[in-house]
Image: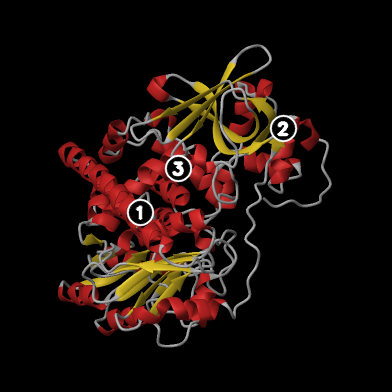
Amino acid sequence: MTKKTAVIDDKFSTYHPLTQTLLKNRGITTSGEAEKFLHPDYEHDIHDPFLILNMEKAVERILRAIDAKEKIVVYGDYDCDGIPGSVILHDFFKKIGYKHFENYIPHRHDEGYGLNTDAVDEFAKNGTGLLITVDCGITDVKEVAHANSFGIDVIITDHHLPQEIIPSAYAILNSKQKGDTYPDNMLCGAGLAWKLVQALLKKRAKEWNVGEGWEKWLLDMAGLSTIADMVPLRNENRVLAHYGLKVLRKSPRPGLMKLLRKLRVDQRYLTEEDVGFTIAPRINAASRMGIPLDAFRLLSTTDETEADLLSDHLNEMNETRKGVVAVMIKEAKKKIALREMREVIVVGNPAWKPGVLGLAANRLMEDYERPVFVWGREGGTHIKGSCRSDGSINVVELMVSVRQGIFLDVGGHELAGGFSISHEQIHFLEEEILLAHGKIEKKEAKKLMAIDSTLSLDQVTWETQRLVEQLAPFGIGNPKPLFLFENIEIGGVKIFGKEKNHLELQFENNVGKKIPAIGFFISQENFKTAVEEGKFINLFATLEKSMFRGRPELRLRIVDIQKV
């Protein structure tokens, strides 16, 4: 959380003291900033899409394609940003009655990330005149040139960082590129796709007989991706997430409704946590474990039967994914236990599925508190891998520092990355990474928790929860407020769940009211102190409203426990 020094005006001082504290912890110190943050306004806080560099040019080309009935291909990434973004453009073309388009989602394992030349060849054979990317394309210099050679114009919509050489696309919508002065350069891929539709409707909504404000219904997909893709929930992203959740709670999409019903999530009370931990993993499971187009079909279908089958299918794939990751982590830990612990963990197995390596790397990084590289192949031409940093090093910088010729390809950002490597070089990977690690600059990985305030158990009330909820939705750039409850006595301990991996503690306030605290997928071994009835502890927790079985319950969500 960022803090800044500023003059606090009189109106800011009228907010509840807890609200003032939470806002100041997020760098907000004036009433103007506070009002904008606490009360996002669609009319005032959604920017003109034509402020994005090249938007006019992109819109002009799409309108020309529509007028000429050109074949348009929407090429979306296979994750929970590219897929919802692709649904946005799909729904737009359907709404205006345009039939000469198709959606294409590449297969994660067979085709890889971004544009690929084989797919472009097929588009050319099918007479495609315009290719629009969603959440990918900014690094695909060769592939865009290949499309151009067939006379296919490419419009790139992508939020990833442009490289030194950018593709020769007809138009690039990416506010991270040079020359773009759009007020918010942190929109996700689906956010950019939504801005493109917003711009198109500004030009021709009346001609297409599309009612004013129809694009708001597409905010369910833009909001879903904004939350799932972990972009900062500040500025325009906060507005997209805020209104996106409102639309998601009313969204008539059959696939979404059936999925939530089967998972016993009440759509009316959907939260950002439901998006991050329930919806997004199932959308991503399609590409990790099967065919990503299934996730696209789930979100875009209007057929009840298809929605029913696909919701079952994605849920089953997610369960399979959980099992695969669990087995992978167990195997990895066995391998690690047989060796000397080193500064960087490098572990792999040719049988491991590339689509879930990142999940395993993240878990191992958290458990061993050091950078982790995990690799697998499962029938692919090359070995692929994922890496995660504990914050002590930049993993992309580390991979770039490795001796030339080891990696075939690397990518990512400071804390997470991916790579490919040949079968011959995999035997040298660990030593080369350790050698490079010894030469690059490192920093201390900070594990300190930033608490927002100290509360008493008497302050665990619906009024406090109301004050906290004003700051929702929570995520990157706006973490859920973390509170410290000092020297409180444990009144009861309960381990529950099929695998006995959930923990419930009971506390009691000064008037005898029971206060439950829940920790999912944790056990007593997670804490450096014994969790026993009658013991006094310091509890780090967030407040949450549970709607289990349709009844509201106020409880604490356990983050950490410390010995008093």
Residue 163 appears in view:
no
- Direction from residue 295 to residue 474 in the image, left or right: right
Q: How is the image coloured?
A: secondary structure
Badge 3 marks a residue whose secondary structure is helix
Q: Give the CA distance from mark 2 to mark 1.
A: 43 Å
Which type of secondary structure does the marked residue at label 1 adopt? helix
To which residue does mark 3 refer?
244
Q: Earlier in the sequence, mark 3 or mark 2?
A: 2
Nearest to the observer: residue 467 or residue 547: 547
Marks 1 and 3, the one that precedes in the sequence: 3
Q: Residue at x 71, y 36 (%)?
A: 453
Seen at 33% across and 58% down, the residue is 331
- Residue 139: x, y in percent? 41, 75
Q: CA distance from mark 1 to mark 3?
A: 38 Å
Of the residues under marks 2 and 1, which one precedes in the sequence?
2
Give the mark toward the camera: 3 or 2: 2
The relative height of residue 558 versus residue 554 in the rendered view (above or below) is below
Q: Are marks 3 and 2 in contact (CB under 8 Å)?
A: no
Q: Position of residue 58 (x, y in %)?
A: 40, 68
How dense is the environment of label 3, judged by Cα within 10 Å: few (below 14), some, or many (20 and up)?
many
Which residue is the site of mark 1? 330
- Residue position for label 2: 18
Between 365 and 385, the residue placed more toward the observer is 365
User: Helix, strand, or loop for circle 2?
Assistant: helix
The amino acid at mark 2 is Leu
At label 3, the amino acid type is Gly
From the viewer's perspective, is residue 130 above or below residue 506? below
Of tags 2 and 1, the one toward the viewer is: 1
Place of residue 473 in the rendered image (x, y in percent of width and height, measured from the top left): 54, 40
| Left or right of 98, for residue 188 | right
Front label number (1 vs 3) = 1
Q: Position of residue 77 (x, y in %)?
A: 34, 62
